[in-house]
Amino acid sequence: MIKTACPLDCWDACAVTCDPSRPEKLIATPGHPYGNGALCALLNKHFPEAPRIQMPRVDGREVSMEQALDAVAEALKAPNPLLWRGSGNLGVMQEVTNLLIAELGGTLTRGSLCDGAGQAGILEGRGINRQLPPEQIANAEVIVVWGRNLPVTNAHLMPFIEGKKLVVIDPVRTTLARKADLHIPIKPRSDVYLALLLSRFLTMEDTQHDEWLEQWGPEFDEFYDFTRSFRIKALLEYMGLALDDIGDLLTYLQRDRVVFLVGGGVQKYSIGHYTLWAIDSLAATLGLFGREGCGVSFLGNSRQGFDNPFRVTTPTVPIVTTPFERFETVLVQGGNPAASMPDSQRVQANLERVKNLIYFGLYENESSSLARIVIPAKSFLEKNDLRLSYGHQYVTEMPRCLESEIGISEYDFTAELFGRLGLSGLRSEKEYLRHWIAQCRQEEGRLVLPDYEPLPYAEGFGEEGGEEFTFMDDFDDDFEDTRRFRKARKTKPKEEEITEFWLLSPKQSHSLNTQFRRKEIVHLPPTLGIAEGERVRIVSEIGSVELTATIDVRLRPDCVLIPAGTPGVNRLTPPILSEEGDGACYQEVKVSVERVD
Ligand SMILES: Nc1nc2c(c(=O)[nH]1)N[C@H]1C(S)=C(S)[C@@H](COP(=O)(O)OP(=O)(O)OC[C@H]3O[C@@H](n4cnc5c(=O)[nH]c(N)nc54)[C@H](O)[C@@H]3O)O[C@H]1N2
Ligand SMILES: Nc1nc2c(c(=O)[nH]1)N[C@H]1C(S)=C(S)[C@@H](COP(=O)(O)OP(=O)(O)OC[C@H]3O[C@@H](n4cnc5c(=O)[nH]c(N)nc54)[C@H](O)[C@@H]3O)O[C@H]1N2
Ligand code: SF4
Ligand SMILES: [Mo]
């Protein structure tokens, strides 16, 4: 039995035990403090069943790994090669290829398809993004799940919220929303207004946390004035909420121990950083930082506190709007930019213009089909690595569990190319892994992140602690819908008058982004009058896609939903960067629905 961890891009980063004689039957490592004895179907069913790329290819022909690596070496001689790395495997050794690109004078990406905007918002208020340990979540009385879909994306946190008062803020009436004590079916992209309005009401009712604010929030009065610059009635109308909804929500927030579990959903917008900043400012109004059973959890920065041996200084291009066509050689590693980036039609056209597109991955997908050179990777069971998590503090070693003829590890790939290209300075794989592990801390015999704090922000904010919280103090929103809002629309459109819909693209249970089972379905609200199974064309100002309709009673009448990972979803999404954090804005778009005749 060998202990390892799940490499998939998921909050849970489960500890996994592998019996090398039955690698298709992985089990959850018994006794791990995070995890409830079960792994999800993504790892247990879809991962072992997914057909792997078996052989390297060059110019459409299968070749040996030696020949393929020769071709890669030749391609990397072109000036300024670009490395575009996705999040197919979250092991730290994925990043070793940075060293190769830096040696070659190449380019890396910056920003994020995932949490860039939210991360930037957290830094505004707190100066550093510390993780809220699940043990603090378990101590809360009230859990507010704000744009995170726990049962689908973060299932192993469910036991930690059991028995608590539950509030869900989500435009979709998800399974969790149905179970909640209160569900706020918020209009998409309006969370920033809700957070500001709640802060204002809490203060009007004199339920701000004076003692905490005195120590850590001296700018609170200015923040309160700022929240008063928005008109209550106009905000309520814009969000489509009644005063009663806010009143109900306040009674939960006024409890003593409150935790916000914020997810990706709230920040897939140009203003995503403001949303996290506003939610944090609301939390600060309540004094939720650094107190037992309180806090705000978002995707943590798992690399924080590490001296990262793979950090290099190179020019960068934004990962959200990568100009592939400007590069002669592009290495795509562990990702599927042709499907996962916004405006995927343009991305595909630009990838086609790259002379040497190298794809290094486990599976065939939209990106591998465009590549001149295809290099199969080793799976996480076949190589050495280390797993950090953005959802909890535990660190798990990932020793090789299996030998396999297929593919090459990222470390060996890098070493082979250092050799072929006459580069020097690469240390051994063991040394790198030791370097990472040596920096981790030990808690009750387990490795945890170096900057793990059982009660984050108890000693204040900023990189070193001791600083005050910085409240949100400005907000500028120029999205089309908000302009309409500024003109203060008097009446809500009737349901049958809605012709433009918000496009939601949350995660789904059978796929991990574009890996595994990807259905070709769009979820439509019943108010549209379209029948189950009808073919429809979804159109945005960016592009269009044809899908089969499923009628979904969980949806607001102004939303359509296409799960992330659905082929073609990103033909609809805009290639824009969030105002801060170079994040993607997948949901900053309106779509219309047409019947296909
Ligand atoms: N099964 C599975 N698990 C996954 C993944 C996967 O593909 N499949 N992907 C992984 C990755 S890469 C990530 S980043 C995480 C993300 O995990 P989550 O943070 O859970 O992200 P999403 O599923 O994108 O969105 C969460 C919720 O936000 C809601 N939402 C959408 N728009 C808004 C809005 O404007 N306001 C509010 N309040 N809510 C909104 C959606 O309806 C959805 O229920 O999940 C990881 N886990
Ligand atoms: N519309 C819409 N689009 C989205 C999102 C959304 O919410 N809406 N979410 C975005 C988010 S949060 C994310 S994180 C991105 C993810 O987008 P990407 O980073 O592109 O991830 P995947 O599409 O899952 O592609 C992962 C690929 O990694 C490869 N892989 C897996 N394991 C390994 C390995 O060990 N080594 C190597 N070399 N390769 C491996 C597999 O071949 C797989 O095809 O998608 C984004 N796209
Ligand atoms: S829940 Fe997440 S981390 Fe755990 S096995 Fe499934 S995909 Fe992997
Ligand atoms: Mo993500």
Image: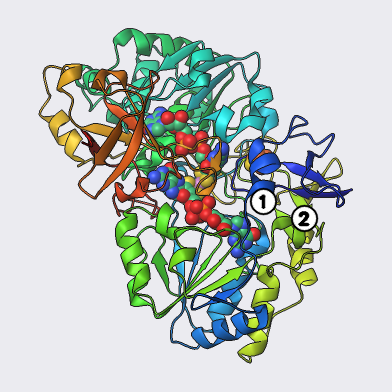
The percent coordinates of residue 310 (x first, y second) are 62, 69
Q: Nearer the viewer, residue 551 or 223?
A: 551
Instruction: State yes or no: discs 2 and 1 in contact (Cβ < 8 Å).
Output: yes
- Mark 1 vs ligand 2: CB below 8 Å: yes
The amino acid beneath tag 2 is Met
**What residue sits 23% from the left and 26% below the top?**
230
330 shown above or below 31:
below
**What residue sits 35% from the left and 52% below the top?**
342
The percent coordinates of residue 392 (x first, y second) are 66, 40
Check the picture and name the quadrant holding the C terminus.
top left
Name the residue tied to disc 1.
7
SS category of the residue bearing label 2: strand
**What residue sits 38% from the left and 75% below the top?**
354
103 shown above or below 351:
below
**What residue sits 48% from the left and 18% below the top?**
177
Q: Residue furthest front?
A: 597
Name the residue tied to disc 2.
398
Q: Viewed as shown, does residue 562 lie left or right of 295? A: left
Q: Viewed as shown, does residue 79 lie left or right of 300? A: left
Q: Nearer the viewer, residue 387 or 467?
A: 387
- The answer to whether one can see residue 307 in this image is no
SS category of the residue bearing label 1: loop
Q: Nearer the viewer, residue 268 or 446?
A: 268
